Image (cartoon, rainbow, N blue to C red):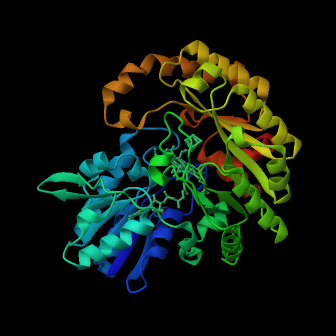
Amino acid sequence: MNIAFVSGNREILPSAVVPVGLLYVMAATPEEHDKTLIDLCFEDDPGAALRSKLAALKPDLVAISMRNIQRNDYGDPRETIDYYVGLIADIRKATSAKVVLGGSGFSVMPAELMEEIKPDFGISGEGEFAFPRLLAAMENDGDGLEEIGALCYWNGGEVVVNDRPVGFLDMGTLPFPDKNIIDEQYFGEFGIDSIQTKRGCSMHCDYCVYPMIEGRKMRMREPTSIVDEMFEALEASPAPEHFFIVDSVFNLPPKHAKAVCREMIERNWQTPWTCYVNPLFFDEEFAALAAEAKCAGMEVGSDSGCDRILQKLRKGFKVEHIRRFHEIATKHGIRDCHTFILGTDSETIEDVQESLDFIVDLDPHSTIINIWFDDYELLEPQRIEERKKLRADIEALLRSDKYTFPNWSVPGLGINFDERQFRALRHAGYRGPLWQHMRKAS
Ligand code: B12
Ligand code: SF4
């Protein structure tokens, strides 16, 4: 088959991210198929670009990746869904090929997004396993469709979501994604590559959708293969100047994370990198190894500075663990960025204030503050209405002088978070996630 792989993502804040999920799916698609990447990230008119590229390519199948539902500024939530509805309309205008939708955004609520966006097929969760099986079934007149776990399709006007076991990929068989086919702006302008060392998170934090995308069972890659892939990525031109380890939580399990760091140290890895960590599994030994392996920064979903809320969110850690993480990371010269989500269910404005005072006292290198938004608010506007008062009170606090700092970003309110500011930082030569430079630059 002649397959067009389309990356729909156009979010460039805080930085444009390589469509690594789609690249992995492409790499796992058997070589007997013709594969072309169409990336809409930097197109001025994505719909027109898509139509003209598809008209020239004449594909038999269009596989489209939807990475995000939410936008970084948490602006009008309908916009992303409407954008994908528009892309499907563009595809239908240009070709009669069937359309398959996948990606982390799609995986968060596949049945609802099938109804909204109306592709012919949807695959939730990892695609390397299910997508080649879908191709085989399509070449076999649809035989075996019902056997493919997590496949969504239409039957008599209704969405069917197969509830067969999904079947997880053996991470040892993961082919390397081809970074030579991506737009040169990813590395030339933003400079950051993505690398994944494992899939799955075994924790049970209340709101978290990550296990829906990657599963709960943690599946590790061999450290040698991970570092081989990183060295291979450095051969791209222009080469990446920073890596982001895209694992849900890198330091879980600790043994794996330490083994990856040891492999980097042994092979004299020199390019800085950033990862997500969980304070619960964070220890001195890991911090020391990460620093020696050139870790520049760690991001942590601290979420709240109030133990009652942390417990409610089932985070598994307390405020004291956040403090401990900050102290150890700082001691080893690793910058820390804490994301807080204010106004979750049952939270009062007093709890929110407790969190804000906690951040002032902790004084991490950087802080990103979001006001809680449930993905389902997109589909149920009355839920937005119910939460209006608390949201307004939180916004007032965040705009007050008491809680305004140059290293605190509030994407939803555009506070220390806008494209012009970030572009200026990049032009001034700052590289990697820009939160790492907000203090120095301000
Ligand atoms: C790492 C990460 C980041 C890093 C990225 C760093 C970097 N340089 O890559 C940072 C911190 C910058 C970031 C920012 C944002 N992120 Co983020 N991020 C993640 C995370 C943890 C991993 C993403 C990743 O790369 N995974 C590895 C790849 C291999 O997996 P994948 O993309 O899911 O692809 C697989 C499948 O989805 C599927 N697939 C993908 N495409 C296709 C296509 C087809 C046809 C098929 C069949 C299958 C398929 O197969 C792939 C391989 O198995 C996810 C959560 C998670 N655990 O998934 C959130 C996540 C993707 N992010 C999310 C969001 C919202 C954002 C932001 C908009 C806001 C924010 N700050 O969170 C920005 C947008 C940035 C941008 N430019 O797009 C959401 C998206 C869903 C939603 N609710 O909207 C997620 C799911 C987290 C969440 N909050 O729920 N993010
Ligand atoms: S540790 Fe992180 S990735 Fe895992 S369930 Fe909790 S919030 Fe989600």
Q: Quadrant of the N terminus?
A: bottom left
Name the residue nearer the viewer: 373 or 91: 373
Q: Furthest residue to the top? A: 350
> Does residue 128 lie above or below 103 as drawn?
below
Q: Is residue 109 visible?
A: yes
Q: Is residue 396 left or right of residue 37?
A: right
> Does residue 333 lie above or below 169 as drawn?
above
Q: Furthest residue to the left? A: 156
Name the residue nearer the viewer: 289 or 122: 289
Query: Percent x, y for residue 424?
Result: 70, 51
User: Which residue is pictured at 42% across the width and 76% down the height?
Assistant: 29
User: Which residue is pictured at 24% across the width and 49% down the height?
Assistant: 115
Q: Is residue 378 left or right of residue 331?
A: left
Choose top left, top right, bottom left or bottom right for residue 294. bottom right
Query: Percent x, y for residue 250?
Result: 66, 52
Query: Percent x, y for residue 22?
Result: 47, 66
User: Which residue is pictured at 42% across the width and 46% down the height?
Assistant: 69
Query: Percent x, y for residue 413?
Result: 56, 32
Q: Is residue 431 visible?
A: no
Q: Quadrant of the C terminus?
A: top right
Name the residue nearer the viewer: 34 or 331: 331
Q: Furthest residue to the right? A: 331
Choose top left, top right, bottom left or bottom right for residue 363. top right
Q: Quadrant of ligand 2?
A: top right
Choose top left, top right, bottom left or bottom right for residue 396. top right
Total numbered labels placed on residues in the image? 0
> Does residue 147 lie above or below 61 as drawn?
above
Q: Is residue 420 left or right of residue 102?
A: right
